[in-house]
Image (tube, rainbow, N blue to C red):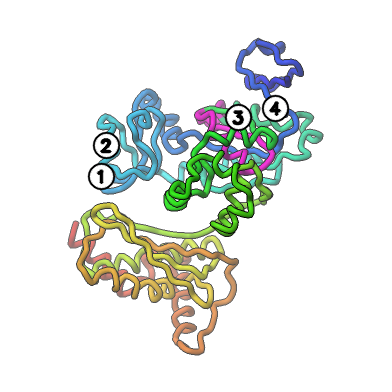
């Protein structure tokens, strides 16, 4: 069976016990080692790993990267995970589970710089790179063996060593015949892992896993599947595709395909952006409608700024509220024309907020997201509301002034009021 030495990237055809070139026993065997070409690259505990790299005193300590006591965990190291800490956990719960953890405020500028370094290394291998977040992405290495004189598996082993040696962090690699299996493989051997799944062996590997192991099956869908008797992926495999489609529609077809290791999505260059969003966790719970409305305007402004920065506009707007008891409420509206303007976001979500604040329920977080994205074009005119064009022109003018003189150069009345409230509270 072909064997890859992860220490020097030598490939031996018959599976030695140790590498005949460097003597390492850090070997990887797989019957399809030299033919698989779709990879998923996932950095291990990315933010925490960078913080440990920059401060060696943290190496053997539990590290949590996240907000204050009312925030959530962005990520944590593997030591903290042993105590039950996980991403998106409220900070107070994380500190209760791991009271000796070192908490570090995120430094996204630093993390983005490392992410760019990793991407530059990937670009030396192939132009087909699809980043899906700051610390993970897919690469298609089909046809690169002739260029680099090495099969994809050997190139990826060398990449992992390069990143660990020169950037001071580790990655986990999944190599497979399609994106779904590559993602599943990268999660099988973390951290510092390297796993392979061929399409032929996928059904047997996937069968004993729970259905929510399939990426995209969230808690709600998993609960419905469980109640219908689909607890394991093997339960889906025993059902024909037509029955799954009849019961769950398009989601049923996708689920059936994934359960059998099928995925026809190509790796497309660039990042697949599905939404832009912003949210704020309050230092104290807020139940007053006027104050919540001011905070809503703030997240609308930030969401709009991100949409403009990425050159996108969207049809679907979602407002998110998190209650004092951590229950999350979402309300959505779909526009007839796409937008990236803060004023439009605010005018669409303001009635949604008003309906939810009649009972004076205290909230701890508010957020706004824009989805169903498309490349941004000209602002749309509205025959029913002619004021849209004037508001859009005013907002564009304010954006240009801020770009030239700084964000504080132009402030809305609501923004000034929010700033005054913050100053009074401090």
Q: Percent from the top left, x then y, of residue 412? A: 34, 73
Local crowd size for mark 2, using a 10 Å CA cut-off: few (<14), some (14–19), many (≥20): many
Real-space Cα distance between discs 2 and 1?
Answer: 9 Å
Real-space Cα distance between discs 4 and 1?
Answer: 45 Å
- For label 1, the residue is 69
Residue drawn at x 70%, y 12% as measured from the top left = 16
Q: Nearer the viewer, residue 247 or 335?
A: 247
SS of the residue under disc 1: loop
- Callout 2 touching callout 1 (CB < 8 Å): yes
Image height of 95 relative to 258, above or below:
above
Mark 2 / mark 4, whichever is N-terminal: 2
Q: Is residue 175 in the magenta section? A: yes
Q: Nearer the viewer, residue 170 or 357?
A: 357
- Callout 2 touching callout 3 (CB < 8 Å): no
To which quarter of the image does residue 12 belong? top right
Region of the chain picked out in magenta, as a range:
164-191
SS of the residue under disc 3: strand
């Amino acid at each position: 069976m072909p064997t890859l030495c992860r220490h020097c990237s030598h490939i031996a055809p018959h599976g030695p016990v140790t590498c005949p070139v460097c003597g390492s026993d850090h070997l990887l065997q797989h019957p399809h080692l030299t033919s698989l070409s779709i990879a998923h690259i996932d950095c291990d505990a990315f933010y925490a790993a960078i913080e440990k790299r920059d401060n060696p005193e943290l190496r053997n300590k539990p590290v949590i990267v996240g907000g204050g006591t009312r925030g959530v965990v962005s990520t944590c190291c593997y030591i903290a995970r042993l105590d039950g800490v996980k991403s998106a956990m409220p900070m107070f719960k994380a500190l209760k589970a791991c009271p000796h953890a070192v908490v570090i405020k995120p430094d996204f500028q630093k993390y983005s710089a490392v992410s760019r370094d990793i991407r530059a290394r990937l670009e030396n291998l192939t132009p087909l790179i699809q980043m899906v977040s700051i610390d993970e992405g897919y690469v298609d290495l089909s046809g690169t063996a002739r260029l680099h004189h090495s099969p994809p598996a050997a190139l990826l082993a060398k990449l992992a060593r390069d990143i660990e040696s020169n950037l001071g962090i580790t990655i986990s690699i999944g190599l497979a015949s399609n994106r779904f299996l590559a993602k599943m493989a990268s999660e099988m051997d973390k951290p510092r892992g390297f796993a392979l799944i061929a399409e032929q062996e996928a059904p047997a590997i996937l069968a004993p896993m729970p259905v929510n192991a399939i990426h995209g099956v969230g808690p709600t869908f998993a609960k419905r599947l469980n109640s219908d008797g689909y607890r394991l992926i093997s339960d889906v495999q025993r059902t024909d595709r037509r029955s799954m489609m009849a019961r769950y529609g398009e989601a049923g077809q996708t689920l059936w395909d994934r359960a059998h290791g099928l995925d026809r999505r190509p790796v497309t260059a660039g990042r697949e952006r599905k939404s832009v969003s912003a949210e704020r966790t309050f230092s104290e719970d807020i139940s007053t409608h006027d104050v919540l409305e001011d905070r809503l305007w703030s997240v609308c402004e930030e969401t709009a700024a991100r949409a403009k920065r990425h050159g996108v506009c969207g049809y679907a707007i979602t407002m998110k509220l998190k209650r004092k008891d951590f229950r999350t409420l979402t309300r959505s509206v779909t526009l007839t024309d796409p937008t990236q303007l803060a004023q439009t976001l605010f005018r669409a979500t303001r009635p949604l907020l008003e309906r939810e604040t009649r009972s004076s329920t205290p909230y701890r977080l508010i957020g706004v997201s824009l989805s169903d994205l498309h490349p941004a074009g000209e602002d749309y005119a509205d025959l029913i509301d002619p004021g849209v064009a004037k508001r859009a022109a005013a907002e564009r003018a304010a954006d240009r002034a801020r770009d030239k003189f700084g964000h504080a150069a132009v402030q809305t009345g609501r923004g000034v009021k929010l700033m005054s409230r913050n100053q009074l509270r401090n």
